[in-house]
Amino acid sequence: MTLNNIIKEKIKQKSFYIKSTKTYNIINGYNNQKKLKEKEIMHYLKLKYYKKIDDYNYQYMFNDVKYLKVPSINIDFDNNLILNENVKDNDCHIHFVNTGNGDAICIENSGECAIIDFGGLNGAFNDYLNKNIRQDKIKYSFITHFHSDHLKDFFEVSKSKDLENLILLKNLNDEMIKKNIIENISKIEKSNARHIRLIDTKEIEERKAIFNLGKVNLEVLCPTELDKKVNNNSLVIKMDFAGKSILFTGDIESEAESILIDVLQNNYDLSNTIAIKVAHHGSNKSSSEEFLQIFENVEDFIVLLNENRVCQNNDTIERLQKHGNVYQSYKDGNIRLDISKEGEVSVVTEFNNQINKEEQEKNQLNFILKQYYQDLHLHNSEFNNYLQI
């Protein structure tokens, strides 16, 4: 079977049809040395289903058949397991999902959604989204960097949700290319996102990488220059809503934190920052005291990690606890931070949600028992009065 026939067969299997007879240009292997000199992500993707609009934008060729995919199944919500209570369109809800391994975050506002990273094991993030996020369309999908614990569940989510815009860093460095990152990048080629939008370090440095989600503003702050470490090239995203800011720091380490400190102090009012998604799963290579001290009003730190890494991060957790509340996905479960349209902030966790429900059930049971004994006492009193007569 020829290569062209194989491509057609794969498209047919996905319920897609081809309207164009265009011959697909496929990169001849990831190890082509000529391609290694082109340090842009599109040179490492076999995007058979996309056409190039310009150097920064790529469009899915079969938009009209997106709706042929099987729609996501409506699932009865079980409030004991997930956090879907009190969700209001006018408020902003940030879901930090306990996937067992990696970052997986979803932001909701005004009927629109954005995702920051797709980490997780065994489809845990996809399951959470199908149970908790009623919108089928995801307006923006950011992959902060190309490590598997930030994009492992990407393909499953792309099958069950309609991804409108996939946002990627255009620039690559040698470490991204060498350390099997290409294998992780290849997961993206299976995507059927409607558009791929690339941003480069210059655009970020000029403060032009800005995205609007309902009344939420999302701005990419870093990287403004490439580092030799993959983690330090993570997209750092600042979210603004109702006068409050939240910082999503990917997996940056101390070197990138130093650059981020300068970017933040020189360009932004940090007094509105109320929460930080802690970098690199609470690693001791991140969240330095120098970094934490620039924030005056941060009360909540969200750490997404699995239990196996806890012992490695004790020093960082203790340091964070001196500055505010620390929520850890391995023990708090799924975490949802809510900001009302008036700017009021609250945090709900799966673990505390369960405790509160059990407490409510206990109180209800105690009330029933109390009523029962009161009725029983009244009955006995009436009976004794009857005997005295």
Image (spheres, rainbow, N blue to C red):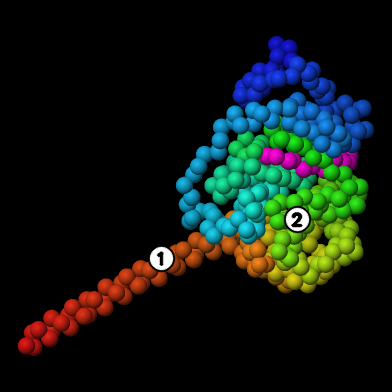
Front position in the image: 288 or 315 = 288
Task: Name the amino acid, label 1.
Answer: Glu
In the rendered image, which quarter is residue 83 located in?
Answer: bottom right
For disc 1, the neighbor class at 10 Å (few under 14, some 14 to 19, many from 20) is few
Q: Mark 2 highlights which residue?
A: 217
Mark 1 secondary-structure assignment: helix
Give the residue displayed 47% in from the left and 52% down from the top: 78
Q: Does 324 sit above or below residue 83?
A: below
**Mark 1 near mark 2, Cβ–Cβ under 8 Å?**
no
Task: Name the amino acid, label 2.
Answer: Asn
Give the residue displayed 36% in from the left and 72% down from the top: 366
Give the residue displayed 88% in from the left and 60% down from the top: 263
Give the residues drawn in magenta, as a range. 163-180
- Give how far across and how far down residue 273 sits, in percent: 76, 66
In the image, 344: left or right of 55?
left
Indicate which disc, 1 or 2, sits on the residue closer to the N terminus.
Answer: 2
In the image, 267: left or right of 85?
right
Mark 2 secondary-structure assignment: strand
Front position in the image: 342 or 245 = 342
Q: Does 47 sit above or below residue 263?
A: above
Q: Which mark is residue 246?
A: none
Q: Does 246 sit above or below residue 206?
A: below
Q: Mark 1 highlights which residue?
A: 361
Task: Quarter of the image for the N terminus: give it.
Answer: top right
Q: Does 26 sit above or below residue 170?
A: above
- Give how far across and how far down residue 359 sits, in percent: 45, 68
- Give how far across and how far down residue 332 sits, in percent: 59, 60
Point out the residue furthest to the left here.
389
